[in-house]
Image (cartoon, helix red, strand yellow):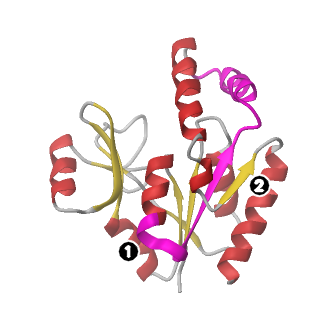
Amino acid sequence: MSKLIIFSAPSGAGKSTIVNYLLSQDLNLQFSISATSRLPRGAEQHGVEYYFHTPEEFRRKIENNEFLEYEEVYENRFYGTLKSEVDRILNDGGNVIFDVDVVGGCNIKDYYGERALSIFIEPPSIEELRTRLEKRATDSPETIEARIAKAKYEITFADKFDVVIVNRDLETAKQEALEIVKAFLSE
C-alpha cells in the first residue's frame, strides 16, 4: 500500500531542500503539487509548480470539499492540497510527499492516520534561522521579522509531529530524513 510523507517547518529550516533530496532518491516518491489562487510567477506552469485557480474557483472547490487542507494566507490568496492530486498519486502506486505548513501537515496526518508519517524540520535556534534567512538575501528586513515571528509560532507545533529532525547540519539532516523515510516505507 502506498504511503504519505508530510514535511513541515518554518521558512528557512531546510525543508524544501530535504524534500528535493528525498525526491532524487529511489523511494517511489511523488511530490504533491499544491493549489493556489495567486498568479503564476515567471515561468511557473499550471500543474507543474502549482495548480493555479482564481479566488472564486478556489472557494468553489472549498465548498465542494475538494481539499485535504487549505489556508487563506492573505485576503483572496489561498493555498491548499487537493484530494484529487493525492488520489492521482496513490492510484498510480506512488508514495506521496508533501511540503506544507504546520497546520496543513497536522490536518493531512489526521486524515490519513498511520498511513502517513509527519516530519517536522526544526532549526537549531531562532538566531540560526535569522542568520539563514539573512544569508538568502531574498527578503526585506521586515519580511525576515515576519518569518521569524511565524517560525516561533510554528515551532510550537513540533510535538504534534511523528518525528522532529533538528537541522544543525544540512547533510546530516538529509541522511537522517532518508533513513526515517526508508524505514517507514518498508514497514
Q: Is residue 66 above or below residue 35?
A: below
Horizontal and vertical percent position of residue 128: 75, 28
What is the distance, in whole Å, between disc 2 and disc 1 at their CAs? 27 Å
Picture coordinates of residue 133, whole percent (x, y): 66, 26
Task: Say which residue label 2 marks.
Answer: 174
In reply to whether residue 82 is colored magenta, the answer given is no
Mark 2 Cα-neighbour bin, 10 Å: few <14, some 14–19, many ≥20: many
Residue range of the region highlighted in magenta in the rendering: 110-139
Could you tell which of marks 2 and 1 lies nearer the N-terminus?
Answer: 1
Q: Residue at x 25, y 63 (%)?
A: 66
Q: Which mark is residue 98?
A: none
**In the image shown, does 128 or 84 lie closer to the viewer?**
128
**On the picture, is 170 further left or further right than 18?**
right
Report helix, strand or loop for mark 1: helix
The label number, if any, that marks residue 87 in the structure image? 1
Q: Is residue 172 among what the camera can see?
A: yes
Residue 167 lies in quadrant: top right
Residue at horizontal 31 percent and vertical 37 percent from the top:
38
On the image, the x and y values in percent for residue 185 come to 66, 78
In the rendered image, the vertical position of residue 31 relative to residue 17, given as above or below: below
The vertical placement of 154 against 62, above or below, is above
In this orientation, which residue lies closer to the viewer: 144 or 45?
144
Q: Amino acid at mark 2?
A: Lys
Mark 2 lies on a secondary structure that is helix
In the image shown, does 92 or 158 lie closer to the viewer?
158
Q: Residue 123: say if magenta.
A: yes
Q: Residue furthest top?
A: 141
Q: Residue at x 64, y 20 (%)?
A: 137
Query: Which residue occupies 67% across, 48% down?
Result: 121
Q: Position of residue 174 (x, y in %)?
A: 77, 55
Position above or below: 173 against 84 = above
